[in-house]
Amino acid sequence: MSSFNYKEELKKIPHKPGVYQYFDKEDVLIYVGKAKDLKNRVSSYFVNDRQLNSKTRVLVRKIQRIAFTIVDTEIDAWLLENNLIKKHKPRYNVMLKDDKTYPWIVIKNEPFPRVFWTRKYIKDGSTYFGPYASVGMMHIVLDTIRELFPLRTCNLNLHPEQIAKGKYKVCLEYQIGNCKGPCEALQTLEDYEQNLSDIKDILNGKISVVKTRIKEQLNGAVTALNFEAAHHLKNKLDKLENYQSKSTVVSASISNVDVFSIASDDSLAFVNFLKVMNGVVIQTQTLEMKKRLDESDEELLQIAIPEIRNRYKSLSREIIVPFNLAIEAIPEEVKIHVPKLGDKRKLLDLSLKNVAYFKKERMLQYEKLNPEVRTERLLLQMQKDLRLNVLPRHIECFDNSNIQGNFPVSAIVVFRDAKPAKKDYRHFNVKTVEGPNDFATMEEAVHRRYRRMLDEGHDLPQLIVIDGGKGQLGAALKSLRLLGIDKKVTVIGIAKRLEEIYYPGDQYPLYLDKKSETLKIIQHLRDEAHRFGITFHRNQRSRKTFVSELENIPGIGKTTVEKLLKTFKSVKRIKEQPDEELKKVLNLKQIKALRAYFQTTEVQ
């Protein structure tokens, strides 16, 4: 088993498709692999050594570092794996076939262009799409195109002069409907070019217009009760909807490009670098930079790009970045480009995705080793999101519980530094409220809580959370005003339905992002208060119900009932005790009365 801490490394890896790389103690790349699920695949090397063959065990023992790149699809992972293996020739990889073995779909540069597949990429002005890692997928795409658009398949020279001379005759493909006969001028070049435009849209992933047209044809076929045609069109539509046009990793239109992106926080920055050669990614790396003087992302990239290009000996004439930059150390002939659309934008998005994930995982790892850093970040975020004047280090949350006004109780939970402080939890039996009055219950609980804190000289919380909407918030605020502390603390209400945050005197609620950590902490507070309140309420209801039931037994008073419950814990256990045990609390007359009572109630 490898000597490095693989368990910590595995925690960083996501359940996403991608490529993983293993490095030895000299930081030499020794293996590249692809995976539908990176975490599961990489974990399989380390979980059970006995299931590995001898060569794989040798590989695992040499691993000292793991790097990974997340991509959008399995096909992207396959292509990127192949590129990295060919570039670096890792010792433990079987060499894969060259790109030239992958098929392409080509729209030939000729009059009435043919559309077909080829394994030869020729720079003759033709338009190529691919390469396709899956030959099966390529054929599905090509078949779909041919079903949707009647195109010529012959290799005739359909120059307008040749057609005008009447040199050609339509063939069987025309007779069976696979071609519209451009060879005899039965199809115009404009009509043919429109078909090619739709085909390019499909191959580029822009299939919405084509799908809309097919849906219209499908509806027309159904209306005309032409179910055979409708079935045929439905199959075409399904193929278009299930088709992913091409890889974001490979694009034949991109050659010799460097891609850079950056993600940063207050003290660190992370720069991702993708190297693209001949339309494929051959290098991927994310580097960490420590800020010294609160540099901006622009300043950091201006430093990082020349350094990284020099380190990897890059001579590319184009650099793709997420924002405009002027870099003095870059030769004038090198173009710096900020793409908005197209294949280059997809490459930039891939780089941005990887740098964002790398930053997230590194910060989680750092916060795990330094919990106080995470706490400060969460509190600062809460202060910002909730518009507080101070950090909410001490938060209290109130929740009420009752059933049709019976056994009303109120629970208070306390969070310190964004974590539950369970020893400070409190609950109240409501004393002054009759019937189901949630507002009055909240008013009493808040008043009793902070009256006591003031009397005992305790510090007030920075934030009070009320489980409820405007009504409960208003009741809580009334008690705070009576105590004269409504200006000393911030109080908010959280409504359950849409998780609205209400402030006193503000007509409109605040809506936090559903994924925000601030909302998650408030929800945790609310849920914890609800759980604590419900548990106490159930105990109170159960105890009072049991006491009331036992007090109905002739000869057994309240004091004796309390002794029984203290000794045997529950009514059920009292019923199950033999007389010898009951004699510890009851006399013979009381035991007979108890047996008679339960016998009567069971019969009823």
Image (spheres, rainbow, N blue to C red):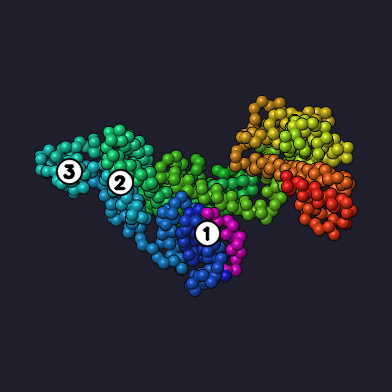
**Can you see residue 172?**
yes
The residue depicted at 77 percent of the width and 49 percent of the height is 599
Tell me which label, 1 or 2, sits earlier in the chain: 1
Tell me which label, 3 or 2, sits earlier in the chain: 2
Q: Quadrant of residue 287?
A: bottom right
Tell me which label, 1 or 3, sits earlier in the chain: 1
Percent coordinates x, y for residue 102 in the rendering? 33, 57
The residue depicted at 69 percent of the width and 29 percent of the height is 470
The reply to whether the magenta stretch includes residue 599 is: no
On screen, residue 272 versus residue 5, left or right, reads left
Give the magenta-colored segment's residue range: 2-15
Q: Which numbered dot is residue 433?
A: none
On screen, residue 461 versus residue 241, left or right, reads right
**Can you see residue 547?**
no
Q: Which residue is mark 3?
A: 174
Q: Which residue is mark 2?
A: 144
Nearer to us in this view, 518 or 95: 518
Percent coordinates x, y for residue 139 in the rendering? 31, 52
> At numbered mark 3, what does the secondary structure look like: helix, strand or loop?
helix
The reply to whether the magenta stretch includes residue 9 is: yes
Percent coordinates x, y for residue 248 in the rendering? 42, 49
Quadrant of the snapshot with the C terminus: top right
Identity of the amino acid at label 1? Asn
Marks 1/3: CA–CA distance? 53 Å
Nearer to us in this view, 355 or 534: 534
Q: Which residue is mark 1?
A: 40
On screen, residue 75 versus residue 302, left or right, reads left
The residue depicted at 85 percent of the width and 41 percent of the height is 458
The residue depicted at 77 percent of the width and 33 percent of the height is 441
Quadrant of the snapshot with the N terminus: bottom right
Seen as rendered, the residue at the extreme bottom is 54
Identity of the amino acid at label 3? Tyr
